[in-house]
Image: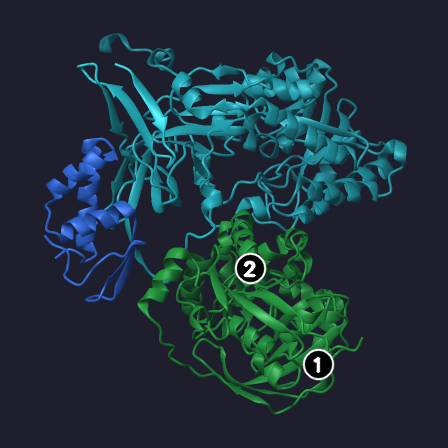
């Protein structure tokens, strides 16, 4: 029979729909998935707070639900997902926050048993690129990673300050990084970050250079389905890319390919690279999920989120070929208008 | 002591204060108290009315209603 | 007067009541009361969706009603489940036994030295691990044979050492002063003590516990071993370490096991003596959530299997012949007892603080729940409550500003008289609790057939003053 194959409809839940000034990647991921012509989708937004813009973007997201904060643990998360699953028959969840990944990875099997796919790194992969362990990771796998000190008490800060030259970077365990230029500033930054994110605090050697980010998708067997490097053209005061352009640089692609191969990375990730003036690519951080600028990969011909959807449903994919070099994204703000009732509805019932 | 004019709690217990822009969530007994206050019924009479309806110790109810009204004042829901 | 409850088809409770004139009246039951509650909605507020799991009421421990327990034994009340202890022990033993042929657990007395608790562990086959003369005597009193008592710690008097040596106990030497005392005493009294040394090392964890034992990296541990092996009085039987407490890294145990194996191997190569056991101490965590941790302990704490894998892989792979494999001793305390202990308590009062926060005052505090200094204890309501929850600070009953049970906890709207259950309090509380301001409460054991037994009576004034003496001029 030669009837035209009906496109499948996938029910996909996506987190990180806080498209604010320092945005989560969810909305960009959804936009890319919606672009794909190979399948239809019903998109379920999962939010933590009631003002995440994605909640109110009804043409992008069909229905939204609040979920418990990651710190509530997997029991609470599962209980909520089970409720949502009963109503929506989820087929795939794409988490987009660093802090929630641990819980979703822990629930991977339970989700699978209930017919919900994920496409995530395993816990070992997740931990290997943890900030506290990144230097060891670099040493073990032959990547340039800036020297650092993992500091567990204030008196150890002195050693780091003596050892490195100013400026240096003081970083929190989960988020935050401050560039400091004096012992005084270092101490202030240490206390500020310690009070917010706890110990240890990371003191990292400052690397000067060009900031490049790479979005990549690994197939979990060591293969890279897509690698797209982007040079930041302009950054916000929080260091986030405001505009960026796709690049072609074989050495960067090789670096990301090696990262994916060595870790056998499964799912999306972002490598934050500092290209030093002498041409060494330092890995500054590895984010275990798609970046907020991921739509640029789709615009350049490598729709990484759509490819992840296909991989998650068991399709075999060949690596993408060329992508368009010189594609630019420029982030812009747009004031979405809605009514207070919508805010009340999501706050009160947890659904919108 | 009265509820600001254009504030009302809907059935689900949401309130919006158009003067300050704040939103609030309250429970069903909270909705009841606010609507009684809107009718200019005194706290003492409200306690009487609620005591008839709910299975509660009177002293506890008085304290809770008083605490609730203090919060309403704090949130500028009461003038 | 007789009252007959009736349930109509809407589920509303009505009662039939005979009034004074013996007329049958139908009276409407009053509605269930819930305190009025209002909260400002703001975007940053923790949403409440999915927090139901946390607030499920816990009304029974094993199959004994909490309400009944509190009625019979007073509030607050510590409760220990014998079934849970036995299950924990058997499970841990199975996990290690299936990976390694020779396993011995030694019950860590300081974790919980209620005699009833110790005896459950001893019945299951556990030796005793003690760290003071007082704990040593307790173990003897619990019928543990001398040669099954491990004597750890930096504080052993001459008398303690003589007693332990005469009883063939396993003396784990902590420092050179102790080593030389023991050599002197053995020579004077012609004793032949069975000894091991405690080794400290860098296992990559923080803080490094280098205050106990002899250091591995700088060669001190090997020197101490050499000193023992060349002394005719001392019999070296084992090597011991304890790398820390509430360890979250199985990797650290790998390093510890490897270092101890290396010492054992060197002793065999150079002196031809194969030590009998390797004691890796304790330190395995319970599922409690440490303060400052982002994710709950029930999710992040590695399983006992992971620790067992780390340890046994190293020892089995080190190169010892099958018949010379050392006995592996484990001194687990917390991991075996924490979740078998519960603290039941009652709300004394609720109030609103000047900054608008809700505060709940419990009848237990830091004095009985010492571990609230380290953990965000899980606390459940002990009766059915409405779904409405609120964030609150939970205080203890002491007149001390530091007496805080939870800095911030979201629970149903508690009111005076409501009862709660604090989970996983079996480790360290019943040994570190303080008699301060109030008296310490009853401890009840629920046995495997759900019978209850007081295993330590609530203190009273007479007990407390029993040791006090008044000088003549103050009488």
Q: Quadrant location of residue A272? A: bottom right
Q: Secondary structure at mark 1?
A: helix
Q: Residue, x 58% and y 33% (percent of image)?
A: C334
Q: Residue A99's spot in the image, x, y percent?
A: 53, 60
Mark number displayed over residue A253: 1
Q: Position of residue C211 (x, y in %)?
A: 58, 40
Q: Which residue is mark 2?
A: A88
Q: What chain is colored blue?
A: B
Residue A213 image offset from top left, x and y in percent: 60, 79
| Quarter of the image with the N terminus of chain C in it | top left
Within 10 Å of the Cα at label 2, are there few (<14), some (14-19), or many (20+) other Cα atoms? some
Left or right of A169 on screen, residue C267: right
Query: Which callout, 2 or 1, points to the residue nearer the camera?
Result: 2
Q: Nearer the viewer, residue B56 or C273?
A: B56
Q: Which chain is green?
A: A
* Alpha carbon separation for disc pair 2 and 1: 39 Å
Marked residue chain, label 1: A
């Amino acid at each position: 029979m030669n009837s035209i194959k009906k496109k499948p409809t996938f029910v996909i839940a996506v987190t990180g729909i806080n498209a604010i000034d320092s945005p989560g990647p969810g909305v960009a991921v959804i936009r890319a998935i919606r672009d794909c012509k190979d399948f239809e989708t019903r998109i379920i937004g999962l939010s933590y707070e009631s003002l995440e813009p994605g909640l109110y973007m009804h043409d992008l997201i069909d229905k939204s639900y609040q979920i418990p904060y990651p710190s509530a643990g997997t029991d609470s998360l599962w209980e909520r997902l089970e409720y949502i699953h009963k109503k929506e028959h989820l087929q795939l969840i794409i988490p987009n926050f660093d802090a929630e990944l641990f819980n979703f990875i822990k629930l991977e099997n339970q989700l699978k048993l209930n017919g919900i796919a994920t496409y995530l790194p395993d816990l070992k992969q997740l931990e290997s690129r943890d900030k506290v362990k990144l230097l060891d990771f670099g040493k073990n796998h032959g990547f340039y990673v800036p020297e650092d000190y993992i500091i567990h008490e204030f008196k150890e800060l002195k050693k780091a300050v003596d050892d490195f030259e100013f400026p240096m970077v003081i970083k929190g365990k989960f988020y935050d990084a401050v560039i400091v230029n004096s012992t005084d500033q270092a101490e202030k930054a240490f206390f500020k970050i310690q009070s917010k994110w706890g110990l240890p605090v990371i003191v990292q050697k400052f690397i000067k250079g060009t900031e490049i980010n790479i979005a990549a998708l690994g197939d979990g067997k060591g293969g890279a389905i897509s690698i797209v490097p982007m040079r930041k053209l302009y950054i916000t005061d929080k260091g986030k890319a405001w505009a960026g352009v796709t690049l072609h640089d074989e050495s960067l692609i090789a670096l990301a390919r090696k990262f994916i191969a060595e870790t056998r990375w499964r799912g999306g990730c972002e490598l934050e690279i500092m290209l030093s003036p002498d041409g060494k690519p330092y890995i500054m951080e590895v984010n275990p999920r798609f970046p907020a600028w991921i739509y640029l990969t789709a615009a350049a011909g490598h729709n990484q989120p759509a490819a992840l959807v296909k991989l998650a449903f068991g399709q075999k994919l060949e690596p993408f070929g060329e992508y368009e070099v010189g594609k630019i994204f420029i982030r812009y703000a747009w004031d979405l208008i809605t009514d207070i009732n919508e805010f009340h509805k999501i706050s009160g019932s947890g659904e919108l | 002591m009265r509820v600001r004019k254009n504030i009302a709690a809907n059935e689900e217990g949401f309130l919006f204060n158009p003067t300050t822009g704040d939103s609030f969530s309250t429970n069903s007994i909270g909705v009841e108290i606010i609507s009684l206050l809107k009718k200019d019924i005194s706290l003492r009479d409200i306690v009487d009315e609620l005591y008839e309806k709910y299975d509660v110790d009177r002293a506890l109810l008085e304290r809770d209603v008083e605490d609730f009204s203090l919060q309403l004042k704090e949130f500028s829901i009461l003038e | 007067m007789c009252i007959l409850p009736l349930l109509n088809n809407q589920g509303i409770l009505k009662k039939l009541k005979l009034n004074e004139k013996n007329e049958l009246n139908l009276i409407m039951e009053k509605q269930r009361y819930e305190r009025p509650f209002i909260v400002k909605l703001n975007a940053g507020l923790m949403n409440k969706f999915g927090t139901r799991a946390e607030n499920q009421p816990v009304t029974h421990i094993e199959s004994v009603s909490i309400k009944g327990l509190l009625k019979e034994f007073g509030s607050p009340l510590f409760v220990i489940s014998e079934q849970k202890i036995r299950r924990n022990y058997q499970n841990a033993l199975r996990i290690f036994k299936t990976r390694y042929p020779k396993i011995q657990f030694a019950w860590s007395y300081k974790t919980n030295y209620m005699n009833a608790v110790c005896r459950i562990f001893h019945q299951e086959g556990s030796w005793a691990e003690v760290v003071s003369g007082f704990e040593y005597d307790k173990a003897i009193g619990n019928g543990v044979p001398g040669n099954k008592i491990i004597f750890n710690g930096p504080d052993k008097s001459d008398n303690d050492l003589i007693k332990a040596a005469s009883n063939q106990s396993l003396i784990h030497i902590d420092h050179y002063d102790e080593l030389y005392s023991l050599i002197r005493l053995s020579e004077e009294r012609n004793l032949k003590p069975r000894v091991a040394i405690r080794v400290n090392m860098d296992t990559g964890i923080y803080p490094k516990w280098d205050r106990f034992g002899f250091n591995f990296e700088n060669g001190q541990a090997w020197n101490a071993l050499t000193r023992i092996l060349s002394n005719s009085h001392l019999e070296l039987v084992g090597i011991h370490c304890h790398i820390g407490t509430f360890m979250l890294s199985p990797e650290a145990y790998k390093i510890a096991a490897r270092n101890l194996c290396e010492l054992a191997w060197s002793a065999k190569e150079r002196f031809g003596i194969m030590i009998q056991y390797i004691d890796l101490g304790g330190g395995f965590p319970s599922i409690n959530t440490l303060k400052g941790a982002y994710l709950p302990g029930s999710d992040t704490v590695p399983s006992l299997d992971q620790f067992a894998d780390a340890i046994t892989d190293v020892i089995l792979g080190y190169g010892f012949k099958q018949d010379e494999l050392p006995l592996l001793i484990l001194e687990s305390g917390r991991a075996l007892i924490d979740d078998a202990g519960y603290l039941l308590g009652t709300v004394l009062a609720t109030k609103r603080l000047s900054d608008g926060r809700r505060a709940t005052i419990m009848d237990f505090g830091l004095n009985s729940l010492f571990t609230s200094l380290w953990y965000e204890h899980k606390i459940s309501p002990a009766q059915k409550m409405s779904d409405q929850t609120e964030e609150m600070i939970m205080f203890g009953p002491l007149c001390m500003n530091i007496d805080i049970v939870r800095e911030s906890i979201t629970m149903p709207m508690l009111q005076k008289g409501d009862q709660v259950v604090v989970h996983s309090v079996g480790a360290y509380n019943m040994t570190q609790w303080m008699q301060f301001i109030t008296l310490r409460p009853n401890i009840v054991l629920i046995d495997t057939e759900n019978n209850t037994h007081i295993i330590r009576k609530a203190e009273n004034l007479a007990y407390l003053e029993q040791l006090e003496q008044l000088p003549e001029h103050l009488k």
